[in-house]
Amino acid sequence: MSYDKRAPQGGKKNTTKKVGGPTAKHRGYKPEADSARGGKKPRWSSEQRVANGLGAERPRGQRPERAEDGRPNWEPRGKDARNTVERAPAARKRDTGYGRDRDDRGYGDRPRSDRAGDRPHRLAGDRPQRHSYGDDRPRRDDRARDDRPARSYDERPRREYGDRPARDERPARSYDDRPRRDYGDRPQRSFDDRRPSRDDRPRYDNDRPRREYGDRPRRDYDERPRRDYGDRAPRAEQHAPRPMVEDVVLERLEAQATLASDVEGMTFGDLGLGQNIVRELAELGATSPFAIQAATIPDVLSGGDVLGRGRTGSGKTIAFGAPLVERLLRMQAGDNKRREFGRAPRALILAPTRELALQIDRTVQPIARSVGLFTTQIYGGVPYARQLGALERGVDIVIGTPGRIQDLSASGRLDLSNVVITVLDEADHMCELGFAEPVTEILDRTAEGGQRLLFSATLDKGVADIVDRYLKDPAVHEVAGEDQASSTIEHRVLLLDQRDKQEVLIELASGPGKKLVFARTRAFAEQLADLLDDAGIRAESIHGDLTQSRRQRALEKFANGRVQALVATDVAARGIHVDDVSLVIQADAPDEYKAYLHRAGRTGRAGKEGTVVTLVPRNRRRRTEELLQRADIVAEWTPVVPGDEIIRELADR
DNA sequence: AAAAAAT
């Protein structure tokens, strides 16, 4: 059954109370009316949340089912062969909230309550790792189901905590001497030996002489030809002069580079994470740390500010998420009020898009939950009520986007004064014009001297202002060897006549695999989705003109394979993980090299092969060459006309 | 240009 079919059945009101009364049908109550045409039906109803894989937002004391929303989105990586971190992709099974494995389980298209109710335990077969929990620990499916009576909020954490053995078994770690990692009787892996002492490692220093980065063909930006608008097509882009500040932004930060080989054999426990969290990570498919995780976790646990750069899909979410939870836990040790009703959040994770915030929550929430901490999502495009309700009940970690957080904070409904850990995911983007203002306002409201963590695949000097203002002596980490040679992504450029673009796009999108198409504007994204659809290719678009529910549904349909092509603006460029995107097609080349890297990073994940095809009209050739050079990417250029064999070959990937 | 606030 597809959403499409079910949608019309959704005549029934789709209210929040529905949470308590799941039926096999209610998955059909897809919020049709909440789509753009603006029905009265509340968006983000429980069904929809369910359908969207949310559920994290526990309505009225209900405990979200982790099996449902606990899917980590975290990004897979390549293999050891490459210089980066790695492990078998299979080990990272639950990597995504939008994954295929999820589809295979008939996951995404069933309402959660349905699953919990009349469906046999999914976990038994699909997620054997669950069994690693003691038998006394209820299966997640049993523990939380949407149809059980509302549970008082107060009870939640206790239960979570109480009936799992783990915490007590945790090797006695003295939180008093916190900064010290407790290696106990663990095999002396001498992690520290391999790492330079903290003081020796490169620290962020804005005054440090710039370091030229390896063999990266650094351009002298002052020499860079000023955007020669002359050679560009007279129509579109005239309004978008590239801001010159970009030149500064491109500066890379010097960082402590961690080699994949450095972390071999290491465990999350070695890094200082507690048993519950380690176990939860294993359930999420993270059995041992990737390089960026091994690099940053100890520093995060020590309480210091951290800048982390790991390429797309290198596990950044866990790199900050897991130690954040561990640290909150340590800080609250012995505090009786830690689960007080209405407590103000103590950690905040900011992301540039709502979908990404959601995805982060899918990873962080189960980790937090494993130690009795709660997360909630605060982002725009959805009604306030549920978010406010969660805040009123009390929450430990807020994950969201700047606008709504700023909104609630400014209006006194979100108290950030107890936030002692703040994360900026996609930090370079969050420090750019447009985001910097709300972000700094939010940072201003957090506890003074709080810990700050900045992560991005393209972390660069663009974060300098924020760093100087809000961070103290941050450690800077990156993963060694993250170059194109170690990537699983192949880059191709098709040089064509502007007038052939749409036809070539249709041919490219015709193949079997999932195609993620990027367009520069919302209107063009919309137009291309229609174009593909008319050509018989199931396509959806996702961009900022759509309601949040439509965005979410489009993404989900793409992840589920109900549509084979998703045409997106850059809303989907960063962070979003969808399993098995075979081809990223750039109908428009981006203006900025970082955008290219992020868009490209939607494929080639989990060590799989991925291809990025950029359609370039001849008059944009030079500009695209420069862009690729900046991105340090070598691509094969092929002049094409519609019908060329190479197009079909790429489409079939 | 896009994104991110508007119950």
Image (cartoon, coloured by chain):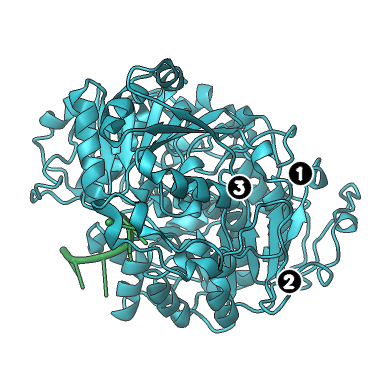
Chain A shade in the render: cyan
Question: Tag 3, which secondary structure?
Answer: loop
Chain letter for mark 1, please. A
Task: Provide the residue designation for mark 2.
Answer: A203
Residue type, mark 3 in image: Asp
Residue A638 percent coordinates (x, y): 47, 28
Residue at 42% over, 47% down: A573
- Of mark 1 and mark 2, the one earlier in the sequence is 2
Question: Tag 2, which secondary structure?
Answer: loop
Residue A90 percent coordinates (x, y): 61, 27
Evaluate whether residue A8 shows in this view: yes
Could you tell me how far apart the alpha carbons at marks 3 and 1 are, in whole angstroms? 21 Å
Task: Provide the residue designation for mark 3.
Answer: A632
Question: Tag 1, which secondary structure?
Answer: helix
Q: Nearer the viewer, residue A435 or A486?
A: A486
Chain letter for mark 3, please. A
Residue at 69% over, 79% down: A207
Q: Which chain is green?
A: B
- Give the vertical position of A15 relative to A467 (above or below): above
Give a yes or no on whether discs 3 and 1 share a subunit: yes
Image quadrant in which the N terminus of chain A is located: top left
In screen coordinates, is A47 left or right of A116? left
Could you tell me how far apart the alpha carbons at marks 1 and 2 are, in whole angstroms? 21 Å
Q: Are marks 3 and 2 in contact (CB under 8 Å)?
A: no
